Amino acid sequence: MNVKNTLVAASLLSMLSFGAFAATSVNADQAQNMQSVGTVSISGVGSSPMDMHQKLEQKATQEGASSYRIIEARSGDQWHATAELYK
């Protein structure tokens, strides 16, 4: 039972720590005072807008960005999105 509690606590802490360092989505007004550090793009077949945001957030976080702003999004049979990254 104690091992179970330890695993649950460790899982919760790892999720909280990941969330603390994840990149956040910003709008154009918020991005005006930030330093751009590049762009990332994602594409795939069939998805939802929330999935696109999640994938962009993951890529931005991997690139070391603190924030990102979607600058292009297309949908249809395939979806594609591009985001500008900020520090």
Image (cartoon, rainbow, N blue to C red):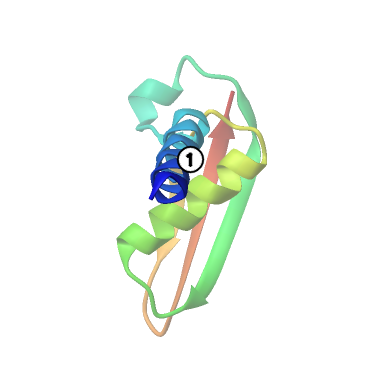
Please determine whether, in this image, residue 27 is positioned above or below residue 71: above
Residue at 41% from the left image edge and 51% from the top image edge: 4
Please name whichever residue, 48 or 33, is drawn nearer the observer in this view of the structure: 48
- Residue 32 appears at what percent x and percent y? 45, 20
- Residue 65 appears at what percent x and percent y? 59, 32
- Using the rendered image of the protein, determine whether residue 68 is visible from the camera's viewpoint: no
- Using the rendered image of the protein, determine whether residue 54 is visible from the camera's viewpoint: yes
Give, as a three-letter code, the residue at label 1.
Answer: Ala
Q: Is residue 75 left or right of residue 57?
A: left
- Residue 30 appears at what percent x and percent y? 37, 22
Residue, disc 1:
10
Please determine whether, in this image, residue 85 is positioned above or below residue 32: below
- Residue 18 appears at what percent x and percent y? 50, 37
Q: How many marks?
A: 1
Residue at 41% from the left image edge and 39% from the top image edge: 9
Instruction: Examine the image and state in which quarter residue 15 appears.
Output: top left
The C terminus - image quarter: top right
Please determine whether, in this image, residue 3 is positioned above or below residue 47: above
Residue at 37% from the left image edge and 73% from the top image edge: 47
Please name whichever residue, 61 or 76, is drawn nearer the observer in this view of the structure: 61
Residue at 43% from the left image edge and 54% from the top image edge: 54
Please name whichever residue, 18 or 45, is drawn nearer the observer in this view of the structure: 18
Q: Is residue 71 left or right of residue 39?
A: left
Is disc 1 surrounded by few (<14), some (14 to 19) or many (20+) residues within 10 Å? few
Question: Farthest residue in the front direction?
Answer: 1
Q: Secondary structure at mark 1?
A: helix
